Image (cartoon, rainbow, N blue to C red):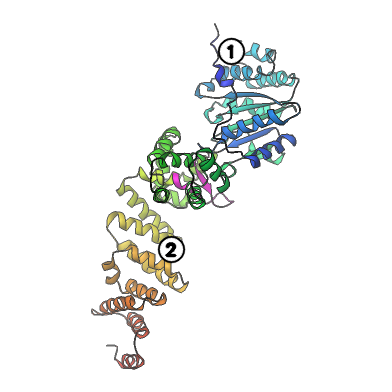
Amino acid sequence: MPTPLLTTKLYIPPPRPDLVPRLRLVERLDDGLRLGHRLTLIAAPAGFGKTTLATEWIHTLEAHRDAPLQVAWLSLDEGDNDPARFFTYLIAALRQLDTGVCQATQSLLGSPQMPPTESLATTLVNDIAAIPSPFVLVLDDYQLIHNALIHDALAFLLDHQPPHMHLLVATRTDPPLSLPRLRVRGHVTEVRADDLRFTEEEAATFLNRALRLELDAEDIAALEARTEGWIAGLQLAALSMQGKGDVDSFIEAFSGSNRHVIDYLAEEVLAQQQEKIRDFLHQTSILERFCAPLCDVVREGSADSSAILEHLEHQNLFLVPLDDRREWYRYHRLFADFLRTELAREQSATLHLRAARWFEAHDLLPEAVNHALAHAVATGDTDEAVRIVTLAGSRALSEGALATLLGWLDALPDEVVRASGWLTSFKAWCLLMTGQSEMAISYIQSAEATLEHGGSSVDRGRVLGLRCTVSSAQDILRMAQRPWD
């Protein structure tokens, strides 16, 4: 007796009650269909509204066409990696259009042995060609399929697809379907995470009209920025906001350490990854931006970061490219926040120190400083931070980056700054140039104190220059006549 099919896998999901119309995206999908593209690919991380968009488009097609387009829908799960089961469900989905189709393919599946992929795919194409009306075949959650035979059969179907069929694949990861070739031939419409992010206007509609939160424009803009338009992130923020009296404080503090965000990302994203990938994500989460050589150094002794980054990009794993050369990346900020919550303090400190030294070696001093300061905060050891801030301070001062330099100095304990002739001089100059002369005098005195046990002529000249800025002309003349030794 054949195994009964779960018919709910073939149902087109109804429109969500809190649906935010995505007209700009629906129009893009319409254009792809009109232009005869074979494939629509909706690929993005968890919680970006892929299924919701596909559903909205399908219901729009059914509502507004003179002759409604037929749709065959299949929601996939892990069990569908068995080729016999996958194609049995695929035939069942196509039979929602016409109960008599795919008889030949069904017969092949009834053979004692699974037929060769090309033979099965050829028969399937011929069966599909016999369907009389134009239709869309939707494969939802395709990221759950990792059987090469199924991928090969789908690639064959795309190469020989009948013109009245359109395939829509919704997935968290890029399927192995020769996407570059499909792009060059104009056969694919792609919707990615950047396209699916809510704009401020869409976020306002979602939060205020759908969820009835009554937030003002400033709060909505702040939430949209914090979540980077991630729809699930907005929904989790709304869930967490319930019962909170001080909305502004909540929004300011909302991050990947929020318990709802942690639960969602832990279950929907991190738990699905291999241990090696989880380790990579955690170790590199301390980086605001990263490239493969930097990741190799931070992970110490590893040399496979380039391959892992390529894997993460294909997996659409909250990775944001920062250039067109696939060199520099960052994580979605809420995702990075979440990953950092799972790092031990000691481990985080070690990773920051490695990053600081890599950035210093590549003359990227502001980033080297930030990581050195993070290491100092975690360990209380300020030696590396003092050394790198001293190295970067002169350049920051010459470039007029006073706020940046003051921020670095303020992040160090005041006694550490005052003990260093260079750092206390930097702080004095910054205070002077920002109109804080009275406070600057205290640091000039500290700079002078560092010369009590000797100092080079450069040191003395630096401190003398500082003292001159707050001295009278008579005092300056007297100092100029003072012997150096």
Magenta segment boundaries in residue numbering: 316-334
Residue at numbered disc 2: 365
Q: Residue at x 64, y 31 (%)?
A: 168
Horizontal placement of 288 versus 410: left or right? right
Horizontal placement of 280 versus 327: left or right? left
The x, y position of residue 254, in whole percent, is 41, 47
320 is higher (above) or lower (below) than 166: below
Q: Within the magenta stretch, is there residue 318? A: yes
Residue at numbered disc 1: 113
The x, y position of residue 178, in whole percent, is 64, 35
Residue 133: assigned label? none
Q: Are marks 2 and 1 in contact (CB under 8 Å)?
A: no
Name the quarter where the N terminus is drawn: top right
Amino acid at dot 2: Leu
401 is higher (above) or lower (below) than 149: below
Q: Nearer the viewer, residue 112 or 400?
A: 400
Determine which quarter of the picture holds residue 173.
top right
The x, y position of residue 297, in whole percent, is 41, 51
Q: Residues within 10 Å of mark 1 (few under 14, many from 20)?
A: few
Q: Residue at x 54, y 20 (%)?
A: 82
